[in-house]
Amino acid sequence: MKRLSILGFLVILVPFLGFPNAWDGYIYPVLGLLILLQSLYLSKKVGSITEKQEKELQDNVFVENDDCSTKEE
């Protein structure tokens, strides 16, 4: 998350750093690609954590093995 914030800050900061205008055509696509890759990585990481937590919840199900029948003999 920290890397994504830094990349976003760089996107905001680049126009004020004094780079030649021709460089903007290279800097912005590279920063955009880095942001895209970082967000995909984070999405995959969060998805795997969520799946792991759901699996743990399914594994910890309590089942009572008691006879609950109401018929009398």
Image: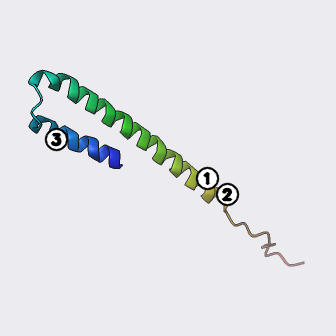
3 or 49, which lies in front?
3
The quadrant of the image that shows the C terminus is bottom right
Percent coordinates x, y for residue 28 in the rendering: 21, 29
Percent coordinates x, y for residue 67 in the rendering: 81, 72
Say which residue label 3 marks. 12
Position of residue 54 in the picture relative to residue 5 (left or right): right
Identified by mark 2, the residue type is Asp
Say which residue label 1 marks. 55
Q: Residues within 10 Å of mark 3 (few under 14, many from 20)?
A: few
- In the structure shown, which secondary structural element does the residue marked by tag 3 occupy? helix
Q: CA distance from mark 1 to mark 2?
A: 6 Å
Q: Earlier in the sequence, mark 3 or mark 1?
A: 3
At horizontal 15% and vertical 41% (from top left) the residue drawn is: 13
Percent coordinates x, y for residue 11 in the rendering: 20, 38
Percent coordinates x, y for residue 57 in the rendering: 60, 59
Q: Relative to 43, does residue 22 appear above or below in the rendering?
A: above
Q: CA distance from mark 3 to mark 2?
A: 46 Å
Say which residue label 2 marks. 59
Asked if labels 2 and 3 touch by Cβ distance under 8 angstroms, the answer is no
Identified by mark 3, the residue type is Ile
Identified by mark 1, the residue type is Lys
Asked if labels 2 and 1 touch by Cβ distance under 8 angstroms, the answer is yes
Q: Residues within 10 Å of mark 1 (few under 14, many from 20)?
A: few
Q: CA distance from mark 3 to mark 1?
A: 41 Å
- In the structure shown, which secondary structural element does the residue marked by tag 2 occupy? helix
Q: Nearer the viewer, mark 3 or mark 1?
A: 3
Q: Relative to 67, does residue 12 appear above or below in the rendering?
A: above
- In the structure shown, which secondary structural element does the residue marked by tag 1 occupy? helix
Task: State which quadrant residue 33 falls in.
Answer: top left
64 or 22, which lies in front?
22
Task: State which quadrant residue 17 falls in.
Answer: top left
At horizontal 80% and vertical 72% (from top left) the residue drawn is: 66
